[in-house]
Structures are given as C-alpha cells and as structure tokens.
C-alpha cells in the first residue's frame, strides 16, 4: 500500500505525486494488520517509552528497556521503512512547495489535508520512533531525516492551529486568491428555484439560439467543482482568518460556504466537520466572539436548510439532465456548440450526489428525510447517458472544435496579438495562432491523435509571467485576451482531452469507499418500481472506480476487489428481481377449484365456509371497464419491462480487466429458475411416491416457455439458447449443479413405483390398450397406472426427456433386467444336472415329467418381470419414434451395421436389442469359461420352456381377448423369451434360430396338459397354449411352420375358439 520514491534525491512534489501521498496516508491509518512489534507484549513497554520521550533519543542510558529492541532491530528497519519514508515524503512536501504559484489554492488545500490526515494516524510516533531506534542500533546514528521529522510530528499535533501561524506571511496572497471567488462561488451556489427561473442547462428554452455556441467570460469556472471551491474557502479563510474581520466580501463568502455543508471531504471517506473545527480554533482567539456567533448561526442554517436546498437541486437536475440527454440523443450534433452545458450539467450533478453521500453518512440532525433520496439512481442514470453520448460522438465534437479553433479562435487571437502584445509575448501568441491554423477536419477523419498540452502549458507560463508587477504586458489590464485564451483552452480540451474532462466533471468513484450506502441506494432503487429502469446506473458507476487508484500505488487492491464484487452483486440482484416478477397462474390444475365452485353453485351445495371469496378466473386480469384501472398483474408487467430495460441498456461494461454482460446474468438466472421450475412442476413427493403426469408437466413446461419467450420483447437475449441448455440438461441423470433432473425423477418413479406394483400383481399390461392398467384390489393404489403409461403419456414423456433421457431410462430398465438374468443364471446353476437330462429327453414325456418334479424352483416369475420391463420399454420406444419422426427417417435410411445402438436410442425397433446386449455383456464372470456361459444360456431357455405348463393351474392365467393378454402378465413372456434369447446368443455367438427351435421343442411339454385329468391343473390350459403363438408372432427368427412341427396348429385354433367363447359367456 506504500510507495517510496526511489533514490535519496528529494525534489519538488507535483500534484501527481500528491495523489499518491493521499492514498498512502489513509492506508497507514486504516491498515488492518499492524506490524507485530506494535502489538507484541514484549515490546509494549519499549513502544510506550519511545512515545513518551518522542522525539528525544536516549539509547545509551536506557539499555535495559531497549534490550528487547536490540534483537528486533533488523526486522523493524525492514518492515517500518515503508511507513517511515511516507512521513518523510509528507515533510518534504511541506518544506519545498511554499513558493510554487501553480494551482495555488489547490496547493494550500492539499497541504492542509495532508497535515490533517497525518495527525489522524495514532501510531505515527511509535512507527517513527521504533524505526529510528532500530536505525541507530544498526548504523550507530539516527536517520538524517529524523530530527526534522520528529519535530514536525510534535509541532503538528493540532495541524490547523500550527498552519494558522505558518500562513501569517502568506495571508495577503491567499486572501486575494480567495476573494477572487466572490463572483464565481455565489453564482454556483444558487437555489433550485433560481436555476429554474433562469432555465439553466435548457437547450429548448430559446430555440432560435439552439445552434449558437455556449460562451462564458469564465469558461473554466463554469464546470468547476462546488465541493472544491468550498474547501478552498473554508480551509483558506481558516488559515488567514484575520481577513474575516476586515473584509465583508471574505466574510460573506465564508458564511455562505458554512451554510451549505456541515462537513467536507478530506480524502475518500475521511471528512472534516466544519463548524466544530472552526469553533475549536476560534474559541481561544481574543475578539472572535462575533465569528463564533457566525459559526453557530451558519451551523443552525446548514442543519435546517441545507438538506432541503440540496434535495430541491437534485430534483431540478433530474429533469434538466433528462431533457438534455433526450435532446442530444435525437440531435447529437448539438454536442458541438453546447458542450459547455453538458460538462456543467455533469459537474452540478456530481457535486450534489457527492454532497448527499457524504452527509448521509455523517448526519448531525434527527430528521433524516432530506438525506434519503430514492431517486438518486435516476440522476446517476442521466449522467451516464450524457457520458455515453460524449464517448460515442467524440469525433463529432472534435470536428466541430477543430473547425472552431482554426476558423474563428485563430483569427480573433491573431487580431488581439497584433493590437495588444509586445514583441516577446507576441512570439508565444503567434505560435498559438499557427498551431490552431494548421488544424483541419481531415486530421479527425484520419484518426490523428491531437495533443495541446504544450500549448496549454505555454499559456500557463505566460499567465505567470504577465501577472508580476513589472511585466511589460499586464494580464489584468487586458481582460479580453484572458477571456479569449480561457475559451481557446476549453476548445482544445474538447479536441484532445474529452476523457480527462469526463473524469474531472463526472467522476463519482468515491462511492467505492461508501459501499454500505451504495448498496442501500441500490436496494431502494429496486424497491421503487418507477426507479428500477435506472438500476443499471449502479453497475455502470462501478466503472468509475478505476480512477480512484494511483499509478504510484499499484498494489492497492481494495477499490479493485470492492468494485468487482459490487458490480457482480448489482447485476445478480437485478436478474433475480426480474425473474421474481414472472408468475404462472394458468396451469390446468388451477382450474379444479373453479370447476368445483361452479358445480356446487349449480347444485346449490355450499361446501365452503360462509363468506369465502370467489376465486378469480383465468383472464379476468384482461377484463376492465377502462384503462385507468391498474391491476396487480399490470404492475408486475410494468416492473418487469422497466427492469428489463435497465438490463438491456448496455451490451457490456468493462471494469478493470473484467467485462460484465448484464444480459448474461439474466440468461444465467433464467436457466437456474427454469431448471428449478421444471423439477418443481413434477410435484414429486418421495414419501408418498406421487408425481405429476407427463402430459401435465409437458403442458406446464410449454406454458412456462411461452411466458419466458415474451421476455425477448424487452431484452435482447437468446431465449432459445436458455431452453436448449436447460432442456438438454434435463435429459441427463443430474444437471450442471449436481441436482436431480426430471429424467432421474421419472426413471426412478416408473421403476420403483409403477413397475414394482406390476411385479406385485396390482397392475397388468394390456396390449390392446398399449397401457398398464390397475387391477381390482381391496386396497386401491394411490395412482391410476393408465394415466401414466398410455400412449399419450408416453409420448409426453418422450418429448420431455428426449432421446438422451429415454436412453437413460432404457439403460436403467436394462440394468434391472440384467439383475433378473443374473438371478436366473443362479437358478440354472442350481438345477444344471436336471436340466441337462431334460435337454436330451424332449421326446420322452414320462421321463420329462419325472425330471420336472426334481426342479427346485420356477423361473417364470422372474421371466415375467423381464417381459413386463421389456413391454414398458417397447411402449417408450414407440412413443419416442412418434415424437422424433425426422430422426427416425434419417436412421431408417442408414444401412451401416454400427448404427444399431443409435437406432435403438432413437426408438427404432431392432431384431436384436443392442442395449440389452450391452447390459448382459457386463455380466460375464471371470471364473466361468465362455463355453460354460453359453451352456447356461441354453439351459435357461430350456428351463423356461419346461416350466410353462405350470401356468395353466394359475387362476390369473386366463386369456382375455378384450385386453389381448393375461391378467398376470404372462403374455409378456413372449417378448422376454425372444429378447433374452437374441441378446444371450448374440453375446455367445450362437445360433439364435437353433436355440429358439430348441425352446419350441422343450415347450412341447405343454401337450401333456391335455392328458391331465385334474381340472385345477388344467383350468387355463387353452390360455397357456396361446403363449406359443405369441412367442412365434413376436419372434423375427421363428415361423409358424416350425411351431406346427412341434405343436399342432389345430390345438391353437381350438384354444382361441375356447377363450373367445369363454370371454363372451363371462361378459353375458
């Protein structure tokens, strides 16, 4: 935070270096982590001793007390050198710069401010003393600057009192400089009514003179900071206070300044309380009772009237700057002749905003209404608008003033030069004329860089030269020359120093050091709907913070970090606020209560409480008798459009090396809100396993998207990109924040809720309806399966999840199937010997019957579960095909063999399911050889085939023609047998056709049911026969001829006849 001038040479300080000193002084005072030896308990007595004896040095007679210091001297020298030489630089500034005349009043104020900041550093004596003791212990002598520095610290315990003594010799020159403000300061310190009556800053008040260039005899004073002048007056007359008793003009100026403010800014957030300090200084001066009374009167007036006066000024400036910005946006060419008005407006507004900020943080009265301005954002906004006009139309202003300088100023100055100036001064004036005459518009068009700093410096030197008493050309006697040159200097700044002029007149980077007040103003702006359109002014104001640092103190990072965090916070809050205005009340579920009320009203049943308010119907917000009626929705719509205007105001802004894009903040929050809304609209309840129907969610999502699309009418954002990003994330298991998506929620619900109830026998798959349907049970389920699994719902699900989400659903289904297959393989291994014997005994019914009784378990329940899962997947695949016709068409025309998996993911049917193949491939065991795996797969098919006759005894195995299936879902075995066989024998590179033929041979054991005499065993014999026909119809590898060779078709025909006949009699 501290900068030390390199090298031992000490030269005069420039104001550029003074800015560095201003930064370094508060840095010492406000440094959070002090050097350890200032708070070290072992050094506490040493520090107290040094402070008590300061600035005396006694190293020889106090060896015991300074023993500990001897050990730390090297570290102290190293760490305190930065602080020590900062104080030395302050001393050098005090010593060398009294005789300078350049910017005299600024010099006085700068000197005064530095001394006051120095006196506010509590540790100054400890730091300087510790450093000097360590220096003497190390080098054997005190630092050469220490005696003067120590004496200065002692002398300036009360800096203003000491400087009052020092400035006695300079009283005449200082008072003359201050009294010269008697025409400028009162004119700047007028009330809002006086401004309004004079139609200040108005371009349209006199249309006939609109194109005339704005002129003034005191051009540089017109945009001079009011705060700066008040510091000159207050500090200046305190230092040369004797003139207050002798010159009424001086007293009038001083009293006017004391009535306008209660505190002045020293530097950043360091303030100087005017009235208390002046009272403390004058109370001990004999004969100053009148001045003390003046101070008390001015303080009372400042407390009672200054707040309201400045409030009215801000109110006037809001309308004046709005008018100015509106006219200039329509006619930017007026920036040329009316540039002075623009910089005056910026300076006036800047002064009022800084006054409010400073006094709101240092309120000295009970009533705070005058120091709370919820419309300050509007004033800042118009300032930013004017700044933007100047930056945008800078070349327009350059063209105007280049022609002005060469075509008018040069001619007038040449005439004055010939008639007024002696020979020496004439040479300088001629150089000015030549410089201006050489200018041309082509230089602007070619993008040449203009630099008139040398010309302005020559004029400054000439002023100094002509101001001395014996000068051949007295500037005081030739006012026209001074006025003309001041005007020319302003015109040159319009050509080469527009950026510097903007900083000089409209920089409000001081907000960086009032972050709490800054944030409070921003929140007040958002809370007031009429001001929300101006909220962008706060992030834009953060771009000013770059000017509050100093080149000679590059390590100061506080403004940079504060600025970036504030800008980010402002834009983030604006985006959040915009989304809070969006609400949905048109979802289908919201109509239930309205319908219920209508039904009850019709049937004259009062189910609700008496006096219950009637629910508003959708669309009522658009029904009104006249446009004067403003509904809550109107207010929300207006607030949204206002805030969107603010977000859309600038495409981006650069703050230090960071670029902020307001629209991206809105886009980001739209994505977050849309993501949360989609997941929230599923209404998933993990405890009760309730979830919204896919079609209802799809309707909700479309409604939400329609609302979000309307935002494009207000903000230039790509809402399609938001939809793509969010909806694509919802097709994955987790979104970018690691949160569950609708894909994971619906996958979990269908697997753990719907399909689990199917396995439990509470739900059946009806092929005729292509849906899962609840079966009549004593304990009804909490949901209707048909409402979640019919073709329209599955299409809605496919549209929501897309190919990626449906692929994830498919993979989850396949994982469950692979788990069931793994269990089936274990059953096969347990019964392998019996199955091997049965495999060779298909033509021996008696032996088959005997061997079947030795099987320890049945596989049909697990195989049925697999069939149910595959049937559900088939529904999902078909729905995906329906909603993705373009993708399906492209893939259908693709003949490459490696696209089977891609085709399956798009919903295209495949003879061999690639997803199932992948899932079952992962089950290969390292302990079992491929031949054994293949054998287990073959035996599994045999196991299923020989177990089928047992289904006939199940009362739920009856075939229903109406649903084209069985209530216990055994019709799903057809899909399970074909898909599992195709996948297993693809993995093991076997013949699928041969293995399915073997399955049909093994299934011929169904013929033995016809020989059974037990009616309980054969009650659903015909329904089970139909399974063989279903398996063949489902299979791309089997034919009816093969079935005929194993199972007589006449039995199938009779079976169909029997089940249809039984169905008719049952329904009758």
Image (cartoon, rainbow, N blue to C red):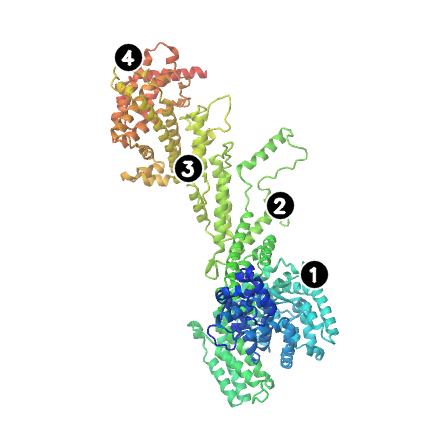
Q: Residue at x 55, y 47 (%)?
A: 580
**Which one is in front in this view, the residue at disc 4 or the one at disc 2?**
4
**Which one is in front in this view, the residue at disc 1 or the one at disc 2?**
1
Disc 1 secondary structure class: loop
Q: Which mark is residue 798?
A: 3
User: N-terminal of the two: label 1 or label 2?
Assistant: 1
Q: Residue at x 51, y 40 (%)?
A: 680
For mark 3, does the 10 Å Cα neighbourhood hold few (<14), some (14 to 19), or many (20 or more) residues? many
Which residue corresponds to mark 2? 624
User: N-terminal of the two: label 3 or label 4?
Assistant: 3
Q: Is residue 918 visible?
A: yes
Which of the 4 quarters of the picture holds residue 589?
Answer: top right
Q: Which mark is residue 365?
A: 1
Disc 2 secondary structure class: loop
243 on left or right of 458: right
User: Relative to 273, is 887 above or below?
Assistant: above
Calculate the distance from the C-alpha at mark 1 to the C-alpha at mark 3.
67 Å
Which residue corresponds to mark 4? 846
Q: Is residue 180 visible?
A: no
Q: Position of residue 861 (x, y in %)?
A: 38, 23
User: N-terminal of the two: label 2 or label 3?
Assistant: 2
Q: Position of residue 133 (x, y in %)?
A: 53, 69
Q: Position of residue 566 (x, y in %)?
A: 53, 57
Calculate the distance from the C-alpha at mark 1 to the C-alpha at mark 4.
111 Å
């Amino acid at each position: 935070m501290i900068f030390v001038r390199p090298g031992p040479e000490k030269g005069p300080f420039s104001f550029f270096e003074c800015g560095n000193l201003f930064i370094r002084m508060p840095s010492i005072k406000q440094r959070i982590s002090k050097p350890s030896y200032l708070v070290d308990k072992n050094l506490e007595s040493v520090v107290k001793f040094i402070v008590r004896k300061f600035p005396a040095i006694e190293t020889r007679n106090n060896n015991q007390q300074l023993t500990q210091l001897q050990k730390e001297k090297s570290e102290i020298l190293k760490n305190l050198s930065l602080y020590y030489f900062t104080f030395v630089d302050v001393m050098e500034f005090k010593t060398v710069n009294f005789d300078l005349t350049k910017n005299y009043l600024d010099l006085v104020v700068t000197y005064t401010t530095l001394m006051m900041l120095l006196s506010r550093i509590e540790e100054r004596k400890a730091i300087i003393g510790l450093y000097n003791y360590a220096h003497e212990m190390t080098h054997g002598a005190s630092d050469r600057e220490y005696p003067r520095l120590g004496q200065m610290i002692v002398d300036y315990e009360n800096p203003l009192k000491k400087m009052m003594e020092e400035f006695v010799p300079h009283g005449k020159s200082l008072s003359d400089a201050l009294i010269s403000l008697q025409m400028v300061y009162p004119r700047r310190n007028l009330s809002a009514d006086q401004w309004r009556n004079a139609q200040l800053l108005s371009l349209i008040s006199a249309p006939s003179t609109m194109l005339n260039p704005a002129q003034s005899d005191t051009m540089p004073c017109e945009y001079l900071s009011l705060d700066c002048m008040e510091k000159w007056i207050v500090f200046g007359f305190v230092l040369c206070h004797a003139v207050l008793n002798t010159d009424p003009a001086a007293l009038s100026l001083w009293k006017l300044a004391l009535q306008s403010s209660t505190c002045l800014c020293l530097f950043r957030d360091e303030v100087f309380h005017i009235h208390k300090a002046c009272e403390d200084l004058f109370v001990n001066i004999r004969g100053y009772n009148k001045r003390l009374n003046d101070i008390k009167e001015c303080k009372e007036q400042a407390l009672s009237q200054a707040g309201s006066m400045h409030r009215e000024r801000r109110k006037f400036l809001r309308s004046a700057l709005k008018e100015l910005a509106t006219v200039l946006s329509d006619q930017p060419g007026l920036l040329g002749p009316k540039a002075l008005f623009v910089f005056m407006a910026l300076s006036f507004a800047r002064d009022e905003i800084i006054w409010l900020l400073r006094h709101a943080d240092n309120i000295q009265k009970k009533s705070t209404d005058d120091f709370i301005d919820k419309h300050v954002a509007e004033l800042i906004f118009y300032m930013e608008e004017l700044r933007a006009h100047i930056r945008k139309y800078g070349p327009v202003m350059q063209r105007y003033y280049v022609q002005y300088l060469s075509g008018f100023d040069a001619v007038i100055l040449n005439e004055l030069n010939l008639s007024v100036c002696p020979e020496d001064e004439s040479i300088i004036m001629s150089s000015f004329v030549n410089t201006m005459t050489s200018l041309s518009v082509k230089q602007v068009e070619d993008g040449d860089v203009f630099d008139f700093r040398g010309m302005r410096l020559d004029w400054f030197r000439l002023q100094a030269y002509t101001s001395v008493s014996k000068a051949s050309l007295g500037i005081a006697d030739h006012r026209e020359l001074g006025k003309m040159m001041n005007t020319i200097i302003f015109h040159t700044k319009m050509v080469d120093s527009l950026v510097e002029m903007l900083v000089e007149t409209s920089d409000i980077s001081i907000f960086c050091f009032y972050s709490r007040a800054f944030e409070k103003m921003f929140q007040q702006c958002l809370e007031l709907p009429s001001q929300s359109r101006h909220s962008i002014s706060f992030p834009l104001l953060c771009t000013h913070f770059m000017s509050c640092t100093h080149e000679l103190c590059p390590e100061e990072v506080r403004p940079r970090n504060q600025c970036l965090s504030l800008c980010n916070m402002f834009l983030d809050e604006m985006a959040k606020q915009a989304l809070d205005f969006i609400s949905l009340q048109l979802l289908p579920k919201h109509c239930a209560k309205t319908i219920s009320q209508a039904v009850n009203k019709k049937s004259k049943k009062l189910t609700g409480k008496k006096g219950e308010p009637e629910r508003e119907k959708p669309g009522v917000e658009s029904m009104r008798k006249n446009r004067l009626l403003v509904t809550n929705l109107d207010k929300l719509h207006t607030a949204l459009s206002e805030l969107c205007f603010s977000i859309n105001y600038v495409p981006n802004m650069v703050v230090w090396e960071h670029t902020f894009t307001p629209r991206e903040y809105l886009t980001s929050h739209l994505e977050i809100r849309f993501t949360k809304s989609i997941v929230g609209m599923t209404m998933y309840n993990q405890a009760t396993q309730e979830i919204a129907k896919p079609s209802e969610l799809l309707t909700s999502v479309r409604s939400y998207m329609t609302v979000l699309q309307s935002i494009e009418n207000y903000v230039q954002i790509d809402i399609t990109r938001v939809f793509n990003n969010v909806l694509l994330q919802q097709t994955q298991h987790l979104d970018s924040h690691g949160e569950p998506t609708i894909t994971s929620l619906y996958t979990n619900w269908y697997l753990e809720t719907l399909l689990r109830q199917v396995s439990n026998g509470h739900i059946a798959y009806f092929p005729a309806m292509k849906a899962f349907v609840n079966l009549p049970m004593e304990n009804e389920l909490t949901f209707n399966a048909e409402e979640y699994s019919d073709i329209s719902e599955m299409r809605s699900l496919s549209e929501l999840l897309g190919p990626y989400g449906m692929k994830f659903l498919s993979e989850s289904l396949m994982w469950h199937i692979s788990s069931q297959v793994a269990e089936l393989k274990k059953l096969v291994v347990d019964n392998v010997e019996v199955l091997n014997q049965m495999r060779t005994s298909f033509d021996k019914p008696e032996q088959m019957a005997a061997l079947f009784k030795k099987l320890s378990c049945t596989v049909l329940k697990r195989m049925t579960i697999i069939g149910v899962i595959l049937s559900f997947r088939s529904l999902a695949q078909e729905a995906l095909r329906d909603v993705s016709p373009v993708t399906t068409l492209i893939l259908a025309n693709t003949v490459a063999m490696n696209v089977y998996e891609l085709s399956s993911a798009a919903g295209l049917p495949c003879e061999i399911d690639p997803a199932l193949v992948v899932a079952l491939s992962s089950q290969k065991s390292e302990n079992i050889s491929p031949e054994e795996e293949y054998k287990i797969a073959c035996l599994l098919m045999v196991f299923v085939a020989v177990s089928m006759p047992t289904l006939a005894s199940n009362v739920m195995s009856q075939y229903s023609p109406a649903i084209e299936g069985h209530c216990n879902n055994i019709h799903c075995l057809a899909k399970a047998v074909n898909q599992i066989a195709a996948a297993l024998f693809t993995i093991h590179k076997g013949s699928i056709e041969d293995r399915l033929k073997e399955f049909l041979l093994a299934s011929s054991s169904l013929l033995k049911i016809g020989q059974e005499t037990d009616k309980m065993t054969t009650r659903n014999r015909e329904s089970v026969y139909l399974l063989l026909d279903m398996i063949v119809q489902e299979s791309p590898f089997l034919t009816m001829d093969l079935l005929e060779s194993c199972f007589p078709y006449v039995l199938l025909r009779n079976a169909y006849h029997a089940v249809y006949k039984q169905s008719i009699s049952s329904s009758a």
